[in-house]
Image (cartoon, grey):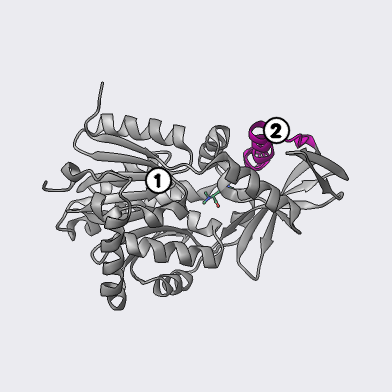
Amino acid sequence: MTLLNFRTLDLAPAAQDFLGDVLQGLKQTPKMLAPKYFYDAPGMELFEQICELPEYYVTRTELSIMADLKPFATTQSRPLAVIELGGASSFKFRHLQRSLPNIGMYIPVDICGPALFNEAQLLARDCPELNVLALCADYQQLASFPWATYTAGYTPVVYFPGSTIGNLTRSEAKSLLKMLRTIVGDHGCMLLGCDLMKSLKTLIPAYDDAQGVTAAFNLNLLRRINKDLGANFNTEQFRHEIRFNESERKIEMHLVSQIEQSVDLAGQQIHFAKGESIHTEDSRKFTRHDIETLAAESGFALEKWWTDHDDHFAIALLGVNQASRTVHHSVVSSLAHTSAALAPVGDWAAGA
Ligand code: AVI
């Protein structure tokens, strides 16, 4: 059955980028791999299991706060166009819909195309009144997307849940927010999930659970490199390790080589000393002040801060900083005219 309210756009980066990034990361000292590569189909499945672990407080705490967002919906006169970053699973969006009943357009963005398209189609089938545009893309590609065309008539709301912002460096987070500021225009806003700094007694087990699901998630990155790039990592020879970096208030995930060894990748030999690690992820933990500062540096302003009783997690409403208004407006207008390759969906505009 053709769904009139469902479209897809595939701007997925070439496989070549993956090989280039992996080679570059493994040749540098210390070795590193970008966390965005965790999320192939098995990685997505493992991440879903992580979200249900008793130790991983993040997801259930975030969901518990969502009901508090209701008053925000009533202040909006136009229907909302929700742009979700990392939207391959529609699970959180379905919760969001219960709190924000005036969503008319949903644009989930993810680099895991098959899961994204599948989930978005199911959502479009379940919600015939909702226009769904599933966009397979890397966050960097979003800057040149003609957002204003797609969100005309709606209030654009960028939804970035799960504290994925914490997996970026400070400067990456700032650049991303600056770019998102151009997407929301002068009248939009952003809902940002932020994991807060807390006791290590809670933090450490959340990233080193008793069942070993997080370890399997971390090691799956090496399996993916074997499968997609023809490498020969022996995953038995690497161990999941987490470290708390106090000065930067972040949990680091590493894969530590248990022996001295060499791995073949694309005709090259990658050498590992015994005990040498590959740094695979940072997960930053925030304070309210961190988010206020980040917002102010990116053209946003913190307008609301919803949190749970234990102050474990917060959802921040970032509105547009008055001073940044007109400058960004012209950027949004020009973006609408730059990408001729992507046909606008004029008939989807609210009120059209
Ligand atoms: C996706 N991201 C916010 C998760 C986090 O908590 O940093 C990824 C994760 N890594 C290990 N467990 C969960």
Relative to 83, is 242 on the left or the right? right
Quadrant (top left, top right, bottom left, bottom right) of the N terminus: top left
Tell which residue pokes out farthest to the bottom in this image. Answer: 323
Depicted 275 relative to depicted 94: above or below = below
Tell which residue pokes out farthest to the left in this image. Answer: 351
Identify the element where label 1 is drawn. strand
Relative to 246, is 44 on the left or the right? left
Depicted 127 relative to depicted 317: above or below = above
**Residue type beneath disc 1:** Val
Q: How many marks?
A: 2
Label annotation for residue 109: 1
Q: Place residue 247 in its image quadrant.
A: bottom right
Q: Position of residue 37 (x, y in %)?
A: 58, 44
The range drawn in magenta is: 210-236
Distance between the Cα atoms at labels 1 and 2? Answer: 28 Å
Label annotation for residue 202: none
Relative to 216, is 262 on the left or the right? right
Residue at 64% in and 54% down: 204
Q: Place residue 341 in its image quadrant.
A: top left
**Residue type beneath disc 2:** Gly
Q: Position of residue 350 (x, y in %)?
A: 15, 48
- Per the image, the residue denoted by label 2 is 230
Front residue (pair 285, 13): 13
Residue at 16% in and 55% down: 78
Q: Residues within 10 Å of mark 1 (few under 14, many from 20)?
A: many
Residue at 30% in and 36% down: 7
Identify the element where label 2 is drawn. loop
Residue 88 seen in render = yes
Q: Earlier in the sequence, mark 1 or mark 2?
A: 1
Q: Position of residue 251 (x, y in %)?
A: 63, 58
